[in-house]
Amino acid sequence: RELDFAIQGKGFFEVELPNGTRGYTRNGSFTVGPNGELKSAQGYPLITSHPNNELISQHYDNLAGGQTVSFDAGATSSTIILPVGTNVSLGEAGTLSTVDGTVLGRLSVVNFTNNDALQDVGQGLFIATEEAGDIHEMEIGTMLGQTQVRQGHLEQANVSIVDKMADIVQL
């Protein structure tokens, strides 16, 4: 599917939750909402970075445990709107464009100092905790060691269902 994206390497796609805070997911099965907004599999608007690279400061309240986190994201962020019937392509740096070359935005892939400390809220969605540490926007690229995003692919679990079922039967 055109709106399926897989992260290769570290990082999470960033989504906006109903209370205005941010959530994080590696599930790149996106859809288009009724107003043209790009939405996560959980139905939350996907946060993207505008390609103009204006510096913004982001402040999050009411994270897991009631703490507050502030950081400079390095780019203006917002949701992305796809015009009706628009086909999109993904550039090397995570830029989403229409087939005629109009840049719609850049996928925002972020990572934390301690990803293991993110709070799992179900359905492949996580929220930040104080223990997760600083949030960093990942540089998307094709160079060895850089985080890559592939269009038309989804991340697969690294667990074999058949092997796990066999383990259960043996118990």
Image (cartoon, helix red, strand yellow):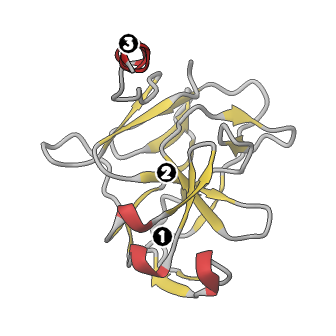
Q: How far apart are labels 1 and 2 at the CA level?
A: 10 Å
Residue underneath mark 2: 106
Q: What residue sits 53% from the left and 36% below the top?
A: 28
Q: How far apart are labels 2 and 3 at the CA level?
A: 43 Å
**Mark 3 closeness class: few <14, some 14–19, many ≥20 residues within 10 Å:** few
Q: x and y percent of residue 137 in the render?
A: 39, 64
Q: Is residue 123 above or below residue 88?
A: below
Residue underneath mark 3: 166
Residue underneath mark 1: 75
Q: Earlier in the sequence, mark 2 or mark 3?
A: 2
Q: What residue sits 64% from the left and 85% below the top?
A: 66
Which amino acid lies under the numbered mark 2 shown in the image of this protein? Arg
- Tell me whether circle 1 and circle 2 mark residues in contact (CB < 8 Å): yes
Q: x and y percent of residue 15 in the render?
A: 62, 55
- Tell me whether circle 2 and circle 3 mark residues in contact (CB < 8 Å): no
SS under mark 1: loop
SS under mark 2: strand
